[in-house]
Image: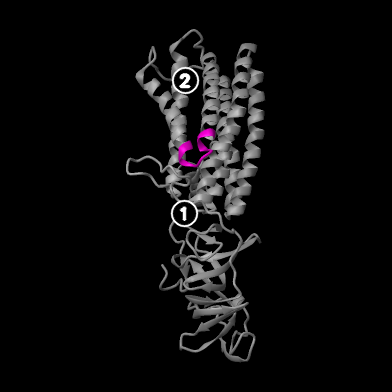
Amino acid sequence: MKTAALCVLLALCFCGAAWGAAHPLDGEIEKCMNDDPSTQGTIQCANLGKKKWDGELNRAYNELMGMLPKDGQALLRTAQRAWIPWRESEFKLLGGVYLTIYNNLDGGTMWLVANAIAEMDVVRERALELLAYTDELRGGKPSFPGSYPKGQTEEQLAAAMKVKNDHKKLGQAFGSNGEVIAAEALQSWEDFRNKEAAFMTWFYGKTGDKAFPLHARMMKNTARLRKLEGLYDDLKAGGLEESPSGEAAKEPGGGKEPFAGDRSLYRPSQGTCDFGAYIIDSDPKGTNVRETPNGKVTAVLPHQPDDPLLIMVKVTGYRDKWLSVVLHDGTKGWIFSELVGMSLRNYAPGSVAALRTRPDGNAPAVGDIFGDEEVTVLGGEGEWALVRYRHPRGHEFIGWLDPEKQCGNPYTTCP
């Protein structure tokens, strides 16, 4: 299950127009991410989006303050001043969740993207709230559209208690310092919630109505619970293990040992391989097959740019920048690694392939690739391929590609 910020990530990258036409900034940020859907590019777009939404928030706040009388201004100012420390504590909570997944669980860099988008969304949501107040004032005297109980209810009390319990549950799920981070987030959230409810009470002309502030807090609690449940679901999607009772495992990282090893790229000078690939040489003279690395040419593979049938090879090993291969007729030789490639098995919408620091599915990720892109084969170890991915916008990264994500023949066998 992919929820909360990760769902936003997937929707933005693969579905298009995910946020609708709520605000022009949504389309601007979506375009930025579509132009560069790499991990680094998406994070940069989210960080830029957070800054732009912060500017829009300040503009909306000043505009709203200018439309309010002094008593309304005082309540809004108090609520907004409470929002700022909650924002900071929320950023810490989000970091606790997503960095736990990245460092201790599945390690995929998509979770760093999810963290960046989640932080941006905190600012975006507040900006849209202030804009909504402004729109209501422009439309005339604000009037609360729904009904609400005349007094406190068991449902309201239960929601308030569940907010407390879900913060604690989330904090317990991501390590020794998680409970402290979650407790700080809860305290600052409740302060902001209460002060925002006070402003809402004044804004809708409910001053003196003892029931409305309870209902306003209930609405805020309900929205908060959805966010907390989404974050917990993301922890589970990232690899958090639960006990048979349904509670999170007590050990940091859901019972898995946190990765404490070297995050540098494992790249030996030679190795033995066992996977398929194909020729990607653009030289019209053809591709040289040599007897030894940089040695005598024993065969020349034809250049056939208009032929949809790729020239397949089996990679059996490598030495420095040369790959040992077996051709379709059984001939063995060496080909310069820059001339051999493979595609990715990323055909389903939202599919992601992580390149890792070593040939191990639990190794930290170097970066993620979206879509059935082509990569250059640099080497390998067993069925794992060491590949380089170059994004159309210029940046690149090198890492180990899981056999399940490799496609050495995209026209016949891989789909």
Residue corresponding to mark 2: 216
| Mark 1 residue crowding within 10 angstroms, few (<14) / some (14–19) / many (20+) | some
Q: Could you say where residue 222 lies in the image, as x and y percent from the top left?
A: 43, 28
How packed mark 2 is, by other alpha carbons closer than 10 Å (few <14, some 14-19, many 20 or more), is: some
Dividing the image into 4 quarters, which one contains the C terminus? bottom left
Residue 233: x %, y % from top left: 42, 42
Q: Amino acid at mark 2?
A: Ala
Tell me if residue 6 can be seen.
yes
- Residue range corresponding to the magenta coloring: 171-180
Direction left: furthest residue: 244
Q: Residue at coordinates 49% horizontally, 85% vertically from top-left?
A: 327
Q: Is residue 175 magenta?
A: yes
Q: Report which residue position mark 1 lands on.
A: 350
Q: Quadrant of residue 286?
A: bottom right
Measure how far apart labels 1 and 2 are at the Cα level.
37 Å
Q: Can residue 356 be found in the magenta stretch?
A: no
Q: Name the kind of residue labelled 1 in the image.
A: Gly
Helix, strand or loop for the magenta stretch, by majority: helix
Tally of numbered tags = 2
Q: Is residue 286 above or below residue 191?
A: below
Vertical side of 136 occupied by 178: above or below: below
What residue is rendered at 60% in x and 48% in y?
Answer: 43
- Identify the element where label 1 is drawn: loop
Q: Position of residue 264 (x, y in %)?
A: 61, 61
